[in-house]
Amino acid sequence: MEIALAVLAAYLIGSISFAIAVSRLMRLPDPRSYGSKNPGATNVLRTGRKTAAALTLVGDAAKGLVAVLLVQHYVPDAAPYAALAVFLGHLFPVYHGLQGGKGVATAAGVLFAIDWRIGLGTLATWFIIAAFLRYSSLAALVAAAFAPFFTVLLLGFNGYFACVLVMSALLIWRHRANIARLIAGTESRIGGKKA
């Protein structure tokens, strides 16, 4: 029962969309109505409001970090399941008709909670690709591909590795439209204006 409640709580925390909440508080358009229509920090940045994008990024990452750390402390046996649950909450939020974001920032928070070295390695991978190529989606795809390798290298084959493997697969799947645009050469670069 404790494990089930911990996983449910993590999912509900993950379902909080900071892109939507911050946009409403700052009287910005709904992030699901412009650009990529993805409720995430990169799309919010298309409004030109860097503060809103930063708050979205921090909020989405923090919910992944906090949810996993809390479960690790109070119900450690449930931690790998909760790590996946908070990520699924972001992708399929109960508060927003199961239409959520792609999960990059939340996944980063989860990875830092699992092991700061995994989080740092994955984040560094994202920054390197983003800095040189200026595509947030491509950076996320490459980072997602590397995350399971960092996890197995540091922790071995365990529950966390299974969680990260599933998260990475889902993150790549959520970027399938971006993959098509990258191939077509029509993907928006970081810092581009909203449509």
Image (cartoon, helix red, strand yellow):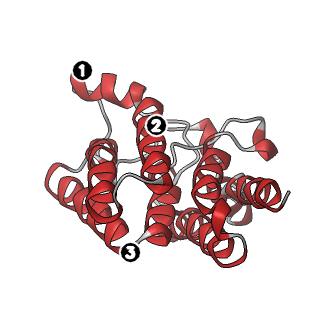
**Callout 3: helix, strand or loop?**
helix
Q: In this view, does 167 lie to the left or right of 20?
A: left
Which of the two labelled residues, at mark 3 and mark 2, occupies the earlier sequence position?
Answer: 3
Q: Which residue is drawn at 62% across and 39% down?
A: 32
In the picture, which quadrant includes the N terminus? bottom right
Q: Which of marks 3 and 2 is in front?
A: 3
Q: Residue 195 carries which label?
A: 2
Viewer-side residue, 57 vs 105:
105
Which of the two labelled residues, at mark 2 and mark 1, occupies the earlier sequence position?
Answer: 1
Label 2, label 1: how many angstroms apart (C-alpha)? 18 Å
Q: Mark 1 points at which residue?
A: 184
Is residue 139 depicted above or below 56 in this figure? above
Q: Nearer the viewer, mark 2 or mark 1?
A: 1
Residue 189 spot, x, y in % from top left: 29, 45
Label 3, label 1: how many angstroms apart (C-alpha)? 36 Å
Q: Report which quarter residue 126 is drawn in.
A: bottom left
Q: Mark 3 points at which residue?
A: 116
Q: Is residue 45 visible?
A: no
Q: In this view, does 89 lie to the left or right of 153?
A: right
